[in-house]
Image: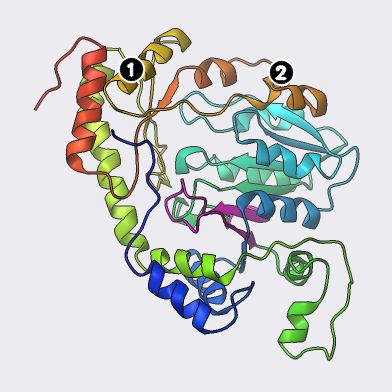
Amino acid sequence: MINFNVPPFVGNEMEYIRQAIAAEKICGDGGFTRRCNEWMEQHFKARKVLLTTSCTHALEMAALLADIKEGDEVILPSYTFVSTGDAFALRGAKLVFVDIRPDTMNIDEKLIEAAITDRTRAIAVVHYAGVACEMDTIMEIARRHHLLVVEDAAQGVNAFYKGRALGTIGDFGCYSFHETKNYSMGEGGALLINREQDVERAEIIREKGTNRSKFFRGQIDKYTWVDIGSSYLPSDMNAAYLYAQLEHADEINDRRLAVWHQYDEGLRPLRDAGLIEQPFVPEGCVHNAHMYYIKAKDLEERTRLLAFLKQRGILSVFHYIPLHSAPAGQKIGRFFGEDRYTTKESERLARLPMYYSITDEDVRTVIDGIYAFYGRKAEG
């Protein structure tokens, strides 16, 4: 059986967890948490990074920092995970879904401005598959209309847009370190704060609304409840697991890119024959090989393809059900304009097995299986 995902493991994880336990501080903001924060600040040139319990919680913190309130509107793609919508809906916002580009599966930047109303407060972009949205255009629109931009970069850790790390371009960036991501701590995430005026409040929100962080830095003699917040700090044992992988970030990234290119080159003849579509990476975007997907002709063909691969011991999966078609999405959101691509493209997309430890032989087996489905023989 070729699994769809296997969480990354580089070898030092258990030793670092042991060190975290030996330090007798396994709660939040221990030594490994600080190392992870500092590593990301240095490598991605982020103003401030705070490790969180999940990307979901990073998004919730971003919504709090953006002061989203009842009746506000947030523009976002419908083709995303529920957390992108939940974070703002929890603050009482109305979700305004905008169609995606069929080439990248990202929000169509050309449709955003028309969706803005006097209630719009923020734009939430999602960098699908670690490929950047067209951020120059989006940031220009946001600044003209005095809107905040939240980057859901759950899939975009160590990916770049015109030389800038995803998550560092908007006002807030949100990372995921779930077990399915390139770098993992089991469950976890990070909030990137890109405006200096938001740093102190972000620390307070993350510490249940208290100024506890200032207390531990010796800036105050006691801490107290000063704002709303929640418990968004991960255990230092989780951070220890992640830090082992951040130390090998380039190695993990290089291996995933090698797998991505093996798929891309191996399946190109099927694309040239008009049988499938492959991912598109725009100029100026450096992706992180978070996933490799293909697009079948339609939903019926994709369903047969996934079943065919499963019979051969290959676990390939589809991805999001568009939020605007879900019961909660219909209740708390609306789709702006025409759904030309969101539903149609989501029904065609199939994700292939992709993880750090997958072997070249297994990748070849997946490629051979796809050729067999289309009645072709793989080349080479």
Determine the image quadrant of residue 163: bottom left
Q: Which residue is mark 2?
A: 337
Query: Where is residue 330 shown, x and y percent of the image?
Result: 77, 22
Q: Residue at x 47, y 64 (%)?
A: 242
Checking the image for residue 276, the label placed there is 1
Compared across the picture, whether 231 is left or right of 170 comes to right
Name the one closer to the observer, 186 or 305: 186
Pick the quarter of the image with the C terminus: top left
Label 1 packing within 10 angstroms: few (<14), some (14-19), many (20+) = some
Q: Residue at x 46, y 44 (%)?
A: 130
Disc 2, SS: loop
Query: Where is residue 146 shown, x and y percent of the image?
Result: 79, 48
Checking the image for residue 19, the label placed there is none
Whether the magenta-drawn stretch holds residue 319 is answered as: no
Colour scheme: rainbow
- Decide if residue 335 is in sight here: no
**Above or below, comparing residue 22 to residue 276 in the picture:** below
Query: Where is residue 290 shown, x and y percent of the image?
Result: 41, 44
- The residue segment tinted magenta is 168-193
- Main SS of residues in magenta: loop
Pick the quarter of the image with the N terminus: top left
Q: Residue at x 42, y 45 (%)?
A: 284
Disc 1, SS: loop
Going by the picture, which residue comes out furthest to the left?
A: 380
Compared across the picture, whether 223 is left or right of 218 comes to right
Whether the magenta-drawn stretch holds residue 187 is answered as: yes
Which of marks 2 and 1 precedes in the sequence? 1
Compared across the picture, whether 143 is left or right of 265 comes to right
Closer to us: mark 1 or mark 2?
Answer: 1
- Decide if residue 11 is in sight here: yes
**Type of amino acid at the residue the image marks with label 2:** Gly
**Above or below, comparing residue 335 to residue 231 in the picture:** above
